[in-house]
Image (cartoon, rainbow, N blue to C red):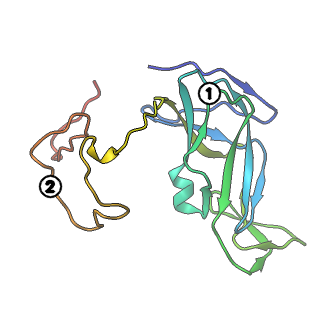
Amino acid sequence: MSIQVPYQKLPGGLTPVYKNKGDAGADIYNKEPIFVAPGQTILVGTGLKVAIPEGYFIDMRPRSGISAKTMLRLANSPGTIDSGYRDEMGIIIQNLGFSNVWVDFVITIDGKIERYENSMFLFPTYLIPAGTRLAQILLLKVEKMDFVEVDDVGVIGENRGGGFGSTGLFEHIENKEDKHEGKVEFIELSDSIDIKDN
């Protein structure tokens, strides 16, 4: 199933693309080359405007390869683009690196070194060439909340108690016998089982 999303390309903009069958997110690109110094946060233009259908929103997320191999992060991940927004989509990129070391080169997004004569950069400064698959976007359905004021929310449903970090980090608890509707049931597979698309 697919939902049509009208889009407008500005100069330098590229059409979002699903690189592989089954991908949840479509890759989006930056429209021009940018340098991101350590500690810097930059709003990167995509060269795209979209008309998101009412009842949906676009969820912007980082690409795992960039997060794993560089110090670059999406500062507001996941980012939310509402259906009423009609201006250019932007990607907020942050360089988590920190140093007082000046060098005569930058690091490209694919890990290469590019030197510049008569220029100095804080290490690590990243160069992101135009047309880099910098983030991915998902189209998600909106369920509106109808807020109803009550005297005590603790008497509604089940209060599991606890708070931030209350379930610990290392204890492993097997699934309970009872099945909860809407929960994912994890099944351990052997190598001999063949999973086929329906």
Residue 98: name its quadrant.
bottom right
Give the residue type that dot 1 points to: Ser
Q: Judging from the image, what secondary structure is the residue with disc 1 in?
A: loop
Q: Tell me the CA gap for discs 1 and 2.
A: 41 Å
Residue 5 x/y as whole percent? 60, 22
Q: Quadrant of the C terminus?
A: top left
Residue 114 appears in the picture as rendered: yes
Q: Nearer the viewer, residue 118 or 40?
A: 40
Q: Quadrant of the N terminus?
A: top left
Residue drawn 53% across the image and 54% down it: 65
The residue indicated by pointer 2 is 174
Q: Nearer the viewer, residue 160 or 138?
A: 160
Counting the numbered discs, the total is: 2
Residue 51: name its quadrant.
top right
- Residue extending farthest to the left is 177
Residue 83 tag number: 1
Could you classify mark 2 by the number of other residues whose Cα lies within 10 Å: few (under 14), some (14-19), or many (20 or more)? few
Assess whether mark 2 and mark 1 are in contact (beta carbons under 8 angstroms). Answer: no
